[in-house]
Amino acid sequence: MSPDAPAGSRAESTYASAVALRPRTPLWRRILGLVLMLACVATLVASWRATKMDPGLLWSNREKAAEFLLGRTVSDADKAAARASAERFPEMLATERARELIRGEYGARGQPLPREPQLGREVRARAEALLGEKTPAERSAEVEREFARQLAQMRGGFFPPELGRKQLATYLDALVETLAIALWGTVLAVLGSIPLALIAARSTLAILAPGESTSHRVLRWLSRFVVRRFMDGCRGFNEFVLALIIVAVIGLGPFTGVLALFIHSMGILGKVFSEAIDAMEPGPVEGVASTGASPLQIISFAVVPQVMPMLVSNSLLRFETNVRSATILGVVGAGGIGFLMSDKINGYQYREVCTMMIIVIVAVSLIDLACTRLMRAVV
C-alpha cells in the first residue's frame, strides 16, 4: 500500500494481514471447545434443577419475610391471653421456688421426699408463704415484666434491636472472647502453615533438599505429596464439622474453637503460601545462592521478602474470616458471642439476636479498616 494512503486504511490492512497470517484453529480443537461449552451449559442446567431454585418463592413469601423481620401485629385476643398468663406468673414462680426449697431441705436432712398429696400440700403452703412475703407493688412489677415479655415474644421480629445496658455489656464481653478465639486460631495457623508451605513448594523444597540423584528426587516428591495431602485433610472439613469432633474429645469451651480454626486455616494458608512461593521470581534466589549462602539464609533473604506482602495480606484476610467463623462455632458450644446467639435463637428472642448481629458486623468492619491500614504500613 502506498505510504500516502490514509492511516485508517493502513490499520485495516495491517489487521487483515495479521488475521490472514494467524494459524487456523484445527477442526478437532473447535469441536472440543464446542463440546466443553455444551458440557458447561448442561452442568449449569442440571445443578439448577438439583438445587430446586425458584426465585418466585422470594416474592410469594415476601409478607412472611416482613413479619419475621419486623414482627406481626398483636391482636386484642393475644393481649388478653398474655395478660391472663402474666397474672398467674407470680404464683407459678413461687410454686417452683417452693419446690426447690423443699427438695433442698429434705436432701440436707437425708430424707426422701414425701409422696403426693403430702408433697403438694407442703409446696402450696410454702408457695403461699413466699407470695405473702412480696408486696403488692413487687407482684405487680413481676406481672408487668412477664406481660411485656410475652407480648414481645408474640410480636416477634428482629427490629428494633435490644439496646439495654446490661445486655450490651454481656454481648461485648462475649465478643471479646470471640475475637480472642479468632486471633489465636489465626496466629497458630500462620505459624503452622509457613513450614508446611516451604515443604509443599517445589522452589523451596529444592533449596532444603538439593541434589539430582534418584533418592533426592524421591525424597522431594514424597515429602511434597505427604504435606499437600495433609493440608488437603486440614481444609477438607469445615470449621463447624471440626468443632463438632473436637467438642466430643475435649468438651465445650473456647479452646475447641481455637483448635477448629487453627486446623482449617492452616490447610488453607499452607496451600496459598506454597503457591505464592512457586510463583516468585527465581533471580533473587539464584543470586543469594551464588554467594554460598546456606538454605536457611536463602529462604530468609531471597524467598521471604518476595512472599511477605502476600503472606501478610492473606493472614489478615484469614483473621477477618475467622472472626465470622468463630461466631458460628459458638453454636456447637465453642464459646463466644455465637453461644449466646444460639441460646437467644432457641428462645425466640430475635431482637437480642439482632443486637448481636449488629455488634458482629460493626466489629468486622472495624477489623477490615484496621487490616487495611496495617497492610499499607507493612507492604
Image (cartoon, helix red, strand yellow):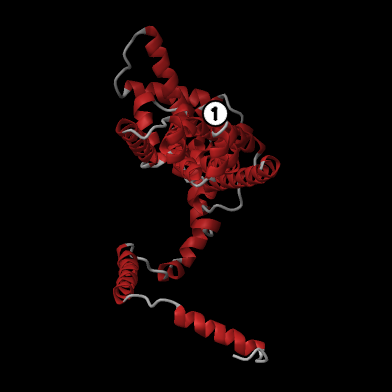
Q: Locate residue 231 relative to residue 148 in the image: left or right.
A: left
Q: Quadrant of residue 141?
A: top right
x and y, in percent, of residue 270 in the image: 45, 38
Q: Quadrant of residue 39?
A: bottom left
Above or below residue 278? Residue 174 is above
x and y, in percent, of residue 40 in the image: 34, 68
**At 37% from the left edge and 75% from the top edge, which residue is drawn?**
25
Q: Which residue does the numbered mark 1 point to in the structure image?
A: 292
Helix, strand or loop at mark 1? loop
Q: Quadrant of the N terminus?
A: bottom right
**At 63% from the left edge and 88% from the top edge, which residue is drawn?**
8
Dot 1: within a 10 Å radius of its alpha carbon, few (fewer than 14), some, or many (20 or more) residues? Answer: few
Q: Nearer the viewer, residue 45 or 208?
A: 208
Q: Quadrant of residue 234?
A: top left
* Residue 127 visible in this rendered orientation of the protein: yes
**At 41% from the left edge and 18% from the top edge, which residue is drawn?**
102
Type of the residue with mark 1 = Gly
Residue projecting furthest to the front: 2
* Residue 142 visible in this rendered orientation of the protein: no
**At 30% from the left edge and 31% from the top edge, which residue is drawn?**
215
Residue projecting furthest to the top: 109
x and y, in percent, of residue 72 in the image: 52, 59
Q: Quadrant of the C terminus?
A: top right
x and y, in percent, of residue 41 in the image: 34, 71
